[in-house]
Image (cartoon, rainbow, N blue to C red):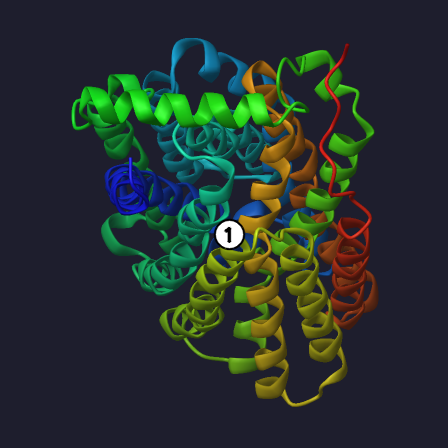
Amino acid sequence: MTALESHNLYSKITWRLIPLLFICYIIAYIDRINVGFAKLQLQEVLGVDERVFGSVYGLGAGLFFIGYFLFEVPSNLILQRIGARIWIARIMIVWGIISSSMMFIHNIKTFYLVRFLLGVAEAGFYPGVILYLTYWFPDKERARTVALFATGTVIAGIVGSPLSGAILELHGWAGLEGWQWLFLLEGIPAVIMGLVVFIVLPDRPQNAKWLSSSEKDWISLRLEEETLQSKGRAHFRLSKALTSGRIWLLCLIYFLLTVGIYGYEMWLPSIIKEFSQTNYYVVGLINAIPYLAAVVVMLIIGYHSDKTGERRWHVAGPAFAAAAGFALSAYLKNPYLAMIALMTALVGLKSAMGPFWALSTTFLSGTAAAGGIALINSVGNLGGFVGPTLVGIVNDRTGSIVMSLWILGAALLLMGVLILTIRRTRLKAPA
């Protein structure tokens, strides 16, 4: 197959798979972070004093990631065994139902319980898709592909922010509060898309009716050749992946990244509401602005990383930019300049995602990939518990967001340093 034919084939695969997965991820991410908007109306519902509300909210927002952590690896191993179509559909339908059930919370205990169950339900979706993409795309195509998929989190911010703000304005309509409408209406699309995934998503290239026999064979041959050329990936056992120091270092790096991401996203609507003193819809519009900038830079970074084959600095550079953004936002007194600095932080956080996963997936294949990818994502996503919880506790104790921003910046600075310590060589396969 010529270079042009190869390019056209992977373009066809991208257009067949990524839009569907992209929409699913947008829905997943909106359901995950819409609690940041619901927070604006939840204090009275949960019945807590304003002095401790930040800590209560931060813990509840973060409990999602405890459920996520506990069930991530088993979920990905099941996906590899029974296929992506059935398992991703199952994940989406269950999480959509649980997400909508958030409308019934009425105290702290129910808030904590349903957030935890939502994490259990969604466990396996993101690493499952990352694993799924390794069935189709070789290493050098992967950062750009993952970046395209990961921009779903950014589009979720662009679309979900004004949407969530507008839904909150339905306060009192048909006897429901605005936050209840928020959870109800934003949970239903996950159920619908779960059914779509079950109908149209092929498990592997061999199951794709829109590929010719020669195209299927060529994809399989290219992936097999890549595996044979990468001795560190061939026959790399799951047990070895779970005890590898490098894999655990990647877990720590991703943990620091998610501390920054969710410490930022779960609290940004509250920060905007505080300095803007405007209605919920306008808060949503302002909240979308940093995501608009991030989507452009994410794609540029992912494309450049694939073109050059370089991964570490394409992760470290955005991490350092995010650290600088957090530090400046804490230092600046002008709220509009501080918002620009926070926008820089989000751009850095999101831009690191594609190259990070492209780097991580070069070390693993087969069962090791299923378990290793899920391990990195599940342990790393504990940062989603630590970030919002830490910000809530620090805010309650200091009465200011400044210290929290310094802490988030320090996490990203450490992340950038650690990614540069990873050697370029691959993990060695056992003898």
Q: Residue at x 24, y 38 (%)?
A: 16
Q: Residue at x 76, y 65 (%)?
A: 409
Residue tagged by mark 1? 306
Relative depth, front residue between 47 and 179: 179
Give x and y (percent) for residue 120.
Answer: 54, 25
Asked if 244 appears above or below 322 in the picture, the reply is above
- Quadrant holding the N terminus: top left
- Quadrant holding the C terminus: top right
The reply, left or right, for residue 415 in relation to residue 94 is right
Q: Residue furthest bottom?
A: 334
The residue type indicated by label 1 comes to Asp
Asked if 1 appears above or below 368 in the picture, the reply is below
Give x and y (percent) for residue 114.
Answer: 52, 32
- Quadrant of residue 158 within the rendered picture: bottom left
Give x and y (percent) for residue 141.
Answer: 44, 43
> Is any part of residue 202 visible from this angle?
no
The reply, left or right, for residue 133 in relation to residue 383 is left
The reply, left or right, for residue 268 in relation to residue 363 is left
> Is any part of residue 213 visible from this angle?
yes
Asked if 39 appears above or below 205 in the picture, the reply is below
Q: Residue at x 79, y 60 (%)?
A: 394
Give x and y (percent) for residue 87.
Answer: 39, 18
